[in-house]
């Protein structure tokens, strides 16, 4: 089992789509949780990012790794949904805030939440406060997840929460924020209910929020 995951990680680092799908399939057939498979892929993605920071990888490799991750996780989605096919935990509305085009993290969180039994509505990236609020009004999720990967877009998280307050929708919606520059202090300052520091932590926080 461990060998399959190591082979999966190496295939991802090599950006070998055929090998990634093969090793992912083997891991799943051996009983490895889809969440573990996805986290292994995400770990390889972080390593590629670290290589870029050290000057050992270049922008085309970053782009290719993101595209490969997206294709592979899409193919794994039925397995993830089957894993979470038990008791419904609640509905989570997710998205990356306006001005921010990063969606890898929010996609990963959405997949892991789905595996835990949440219904996930992922609005994608560059989502305005008005769009978030409109979907909250229409779909009434238990949790709204707001991702921001850039310090310049952090204030969009605050704008969404302020708009929810203004529209009278805040009291029925728990807000969880996340993203590289997000801290507990920022969460406290803008009145969020929780911070998800990574995908696993986001699931833990989401479960705590719906349990009250």
Image: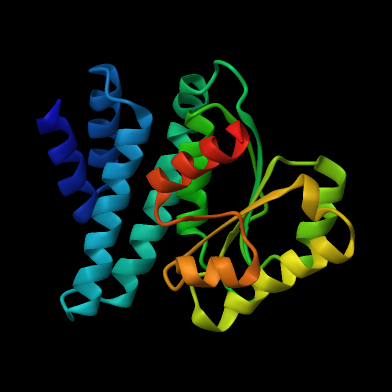
Q: Is residue 81 above or below residue 153?
A: above
In the image, is 48 to the left or to the right of 90? Answer: left
Percent coordinates x, y for residue 17 in the rendering: 30, 45
In the image, is 64 to the left or to the right of 165? Answer: left
In the image, is 76 to the left or to the right of 27? Answer: right
- For this rendering, which residue is in front, 106 or 71? 106
Residue at 84 percent across and 53 percent down: it is 169
How many dots with numbers? 0
Percent coordinates x, y for residue 160 in the rendering: 73, 66
For the view shown, which residue lies furthest in the left direction? 3
Residue 164 visible:
yes
- For this rendering, which residue is in front, 87 or 3? 87
Percent coordinates x, y for residue 125 in the rendering: 61, 63
Color theme of the render: rainbow
Residue at 49 percent across and 71 percent down: it is 185
- The quadrant the C terminus occupies is top right
Q: Is residue 98 above or below residue 72?
A: below
Q: Is residue 80 above or below residue 11?
A: above
Percent coordinates x, y for residue 116 in the rendering: 49, 29
Residue at 17 percent across and 79 percent down: it is 54
In the image, is 160 to the left or to the right of 197? Answer: right
Residue at 24 percent across and 64 percent down: it is 48
- For this rendering, which residue is in front, 44 or 172? 172
- The quadrant the N terminus occupies is top left
- For this rendering, which residue is in front, 154 or 173? 173
For the view shown, which residue lies furthest in the right direction? 167
Figure quadrant of residue 24: top left
For the view shown, which residue lies furthest in the bottom direction? 152
Residue 98 visible:
no
């Amino acid at each position: 089992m461990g060998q399959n995951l190591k082979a999966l990680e190496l295939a991802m680092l090599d950006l070998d789509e055929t090998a990634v799908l093969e090793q992912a399939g083997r891991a799943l057939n051996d009983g490895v949780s889809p969440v573990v498979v996805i986290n292994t892929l995400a770990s390889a993605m972080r390593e590629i990012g670290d290589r870029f920071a050290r000057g050992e990888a270049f922008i085309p490799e970053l782009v290719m790794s993101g595209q490969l991750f997206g294709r592979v996780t899409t193919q794994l989605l039925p397995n993830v949904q089957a894993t979470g096919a038990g008791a419904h935990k609640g509905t989570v509305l997710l998205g990356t805030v306006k001005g921010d085009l990063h969606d890898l993290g929010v996609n990963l969180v959405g997949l892991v939440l789905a595996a835990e039994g949440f219904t996930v509505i992922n609005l994608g990236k560059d989502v305005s406060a008005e769009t978030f609020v409109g979907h909250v009004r229409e779909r009434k999720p238990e949790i709204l997840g707001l991702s921001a990967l850039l310090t310049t877009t952090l204030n969009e998280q605050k704008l969404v929460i302020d708009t929810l307050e203004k529209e009278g929708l805040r009291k029925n919606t728990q807000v969880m924020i996340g993203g590289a520059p997000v801290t507990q202090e920022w969460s406290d300052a803008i009145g969020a209910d929780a911070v998800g520091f990574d995908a696993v932590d986001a699931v833990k926080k989401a479960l705590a929020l719906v349990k009250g």
